């Protein structure tokens, strides 16, 4: 955290805020905010994930929500004095509503609130069983009808989904579904997670053998159970797979492997979903009240349609199905695409002695891993950050406290430094013909990820192979057609090929809603992901939050959950609280339900 002297500026603002809140004085509340202000709320005031930009939007939200929410007791978090840096006073805060307790982070500019983050931390009366509330485990005393922990757990596993219906069904058992399942377990929400793979972690195990996380370990912890201190900085896929399998077991999740979701429809009259799943050769009907699609941002392969795909005699598959390089030694491979998966696959193929060509159809943002770790993540997610007292929770909250509307302004200077530091690296790539970009507004990787979820590569070595010509490159071209034994490009180049890999990314998650529920429902909820920034592949209008993620959608009782490990960890808390409130019949007046501007 920035350092500085305690100024009591935040305390004064919070006192005035509490006075205005107590009397329902909305103009008095809004007066505490700068004209150019941002209030980002995660569930606590809006029962939504919503950013109010400017005083008018804050006024509208308060007029709608203040009476029902009943907020009070805004104060500095215990043991966390306010600080000041570069003219900005800031502090950790706590507060309450009628039904919940919350935390937040506040920044003041010129003595008024510039940015405010408010998050729901727990529901009153439904706190997680941790710390002083943790279960005893052992039952002291003697009685004749005693059952063990193991026996009770086995009874639950055998009944939930069969003789007893889950309140929540999570479709997708990757890191997102598992993280959410763990949160719901602690809130005592009966939940079943289903996945087509046999075991938790198989979605990682079945990918190409060199796959590993490009995000560092400090960024990737799961809820409740962080990675040990000697865990690798960049987790290999099989270690992640084993960790997810272990995590699912020790967190006692009801995980149905080898289970295929065949269809789902919402019964409006009954207020529940009717979901047909196939498990062990048997069709089972589940009737959950809440349905979560945790099928992954990178779960619906985007497979292009090129002329001649039916003519090509070699092998062709999407990058998600790529088994690794071993079967292609001595062969010629063409990889369509130039982002993370393409670079990983091309590098592994080159290492195996394969003649591999990368086809780059549009520009890519490249950032060296070391530079990203140091300049982009180091203050929040690194050993350096841990040593300075930064916790995962604090890092997540600080990152969440920066409104998306102005986040790029914080990112541009970082990527300017990276571009300066690695200038020779970028020159080498450009000399090789590689098309580079830093995003439409030069704001780099995180904004590209948040806006479109694609268009970048975190370099862990493949870029040098491209720059040196070891991975062959054809850039600024498209595929004209596939022939029997080759790929014809738009510039007339013909590339002999035994294998074509389509490293062409993934479609919107609402494609899963179309497959499992209906196209009508998919169009009703609209596109998933993106901010409406009007940048490449993120069409406007501006929406201010990730479309449809972790929050109510236009379809009752349908939720989307996913993202990287950081997002799966952080936002699973707020999605679990929304689901728990509905289970308990707590009123959840949603403010600002997202309008649908794009269906795919």
Image: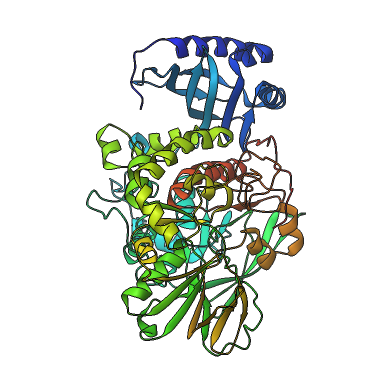
The residue sitting at 43% across, 39% down in the picture is: 416
Measured as percent of width and height from the top left, residue 569 is found at: 44, 47
**Image quarter hosting the N terminus:** top left
The residue sitting at 58% across, 42% down in the picture is: 578
Q: Report which quarter residue 524 is drawn in.
A: bottom right
- Most foreground residue, 493 or 507: 493
Q: Report which quarter residue 51 is drawn in.
A: top right
- Whether residue 362 is situated above or below residue 333 in the rendered picture: above
The residue sitting at 59% across, 53% down in the picture is: 560
**Residue 417 in the figure: left or right of residue 518:** left
Measured as percent of width and height from the top left, residue 284 is found at: 60, 71
- Most foreground residue, 377 or 456: 456
- Whether residue 346 is situated above or below residue 499 in the rendered picture: above
Measured as percent of width and height from the top left, residue 27 is found at: 68, 13
Measured as percent of width and height from the top left, residue 411 is found at: 47, 38
* Residue 386 seen anywhere in this rendered image of the structure: yes
**Image quarter hosting the C terminus:** bottom right
The residue sitting at 63% across, 12% down in the picture is: 31
* Residue 267 seen anywhere in this rendered image of the structure: no
Q: Report which quarter residue 414 is drawn in.
A: top left
Residue lying at the far left in this picture: please name it. Answer: 230
- Most foreground residue, 189 or 494: 494
Query: What colouring style does the render use?
Result: rainbow
**Residue 482 in the figure: left or right of residue 495:** right
- Whether residue 105 is situated above or below residue 511 in the rendered picture: above
């Amino acid at each position: 955290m920035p350092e500085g002297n305690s100024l009591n500026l935040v305390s004064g603002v919070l006192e005035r805020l509490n006075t205005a809140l107590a009397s329902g004085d909305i103009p008095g509340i809004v007066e505490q905010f700068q004209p150019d202000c941002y209030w980002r709320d995660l569930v606590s005031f809006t029962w939504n994930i919503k950013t109010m930009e400017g005083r008018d939007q804050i006024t509208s939200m308060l007029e709608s929500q203040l009476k029902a929410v009943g907020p009070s007791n805004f104060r500095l978090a215990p043991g966390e004095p306010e600080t000041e840096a570069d003219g900005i006073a800031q502090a950790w805060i706590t507060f309450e509503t009628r039904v919940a307790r919350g935390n937040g982070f506040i920044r003041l500019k010129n003595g008024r609130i510039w940015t405010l983050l408010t998050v729901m931390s727990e529901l009153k009366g439904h706190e997680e069983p941790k710390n002083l509330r943790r279960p005893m485990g052992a039952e002291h005393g003697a009685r004749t009808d005693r059952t063990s922990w193991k026996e009770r757990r086995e009874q639950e596993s055998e009944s939930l989904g069969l003789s007893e219906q889950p309140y929540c069904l999570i479709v997708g058992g990757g890191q997102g579904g598992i993280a959410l399942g763990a949160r719901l377990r602690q809130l005592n929400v009966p939940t079943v997670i289903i996945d087509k793979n046999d075991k938790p972690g198989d979605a990682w195990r079945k990918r190409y053998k060199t796959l590993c996380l490009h995000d560092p370990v400090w960024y990737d912890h799961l809820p409740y159970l962080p990675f040990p201190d000697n865990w690798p900085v960049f987790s290999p896929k099989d270690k992640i797979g084993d960790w997810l399998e272990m995590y699912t077991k020790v967190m006692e999740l009801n995980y149905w492997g080898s289970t295929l979701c065949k269809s789902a429809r919402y019964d409006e009259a009954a207020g529940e979903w009717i979901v047909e799943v196939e498990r062990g050769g048997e069709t089972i009907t589940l009737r959950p009240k809440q349905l979560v699609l945790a099928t992954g941002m990178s779960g619906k392969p985007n497979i292009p349609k090129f002329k001649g795909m039916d003519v090509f005699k070699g092998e062709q598959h999407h990058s998600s199905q790529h088994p690794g390089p071993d079967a292609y030694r001595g062969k010629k491979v063409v990889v369509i695409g130039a982002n993370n998966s393409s670079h990983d696959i091309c590098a592994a193929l080159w290492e195996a002695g394969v003649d591999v060509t990368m086809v780059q159809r549009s520009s890519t943002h490249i950032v060296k891993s070391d530079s990203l770790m140091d300049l982009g993540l180091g203050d929040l997610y690194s050993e350096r950050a841990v040593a300075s007292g930064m916790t995962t929770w604090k890092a997540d909250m600080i990152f969440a406290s920066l409104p998306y509307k102005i986040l790029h302004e914080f990112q541009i200077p970082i990527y300017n430094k990276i571009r300066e530091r690695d200038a020779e690296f970028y020159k080498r790539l450009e000399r090789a013909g590689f098309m580079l970009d830093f995003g439409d507004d030069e704001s780099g990787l995180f904004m590209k990820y948040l806006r479109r979820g694609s268009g970048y590569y975190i370099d862990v070595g493949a870029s040098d192979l491209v720059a040196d010509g070891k991975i062959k490159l054809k850039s600024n071209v498209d595929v004209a057609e596939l022939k029997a034994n080759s790929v014809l490009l738009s510039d007339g180049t013909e590339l002999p090929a035994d294998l074509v890999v389509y490293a062409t990314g993934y479609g919107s998650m609402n494609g899963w809603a179309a497959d499992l529920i209906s196209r009508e429902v998919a169009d009703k909820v609209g596109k998933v992901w993106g901010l409406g920034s009007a940048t490449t592949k993120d069409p406007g209008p501006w929406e201010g939050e990730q479309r449809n993620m972790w929050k109510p959608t236009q379809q009752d009782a349908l939720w989307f959950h996913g993202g990287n490990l950081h997002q799966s960890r952080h936002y699973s808390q707020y999605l679990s609280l929304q689901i728990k409130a509905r289970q308990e019949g707590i009123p959840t007046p949603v403010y600002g339900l997202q309008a649908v501007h794009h269906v795919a």
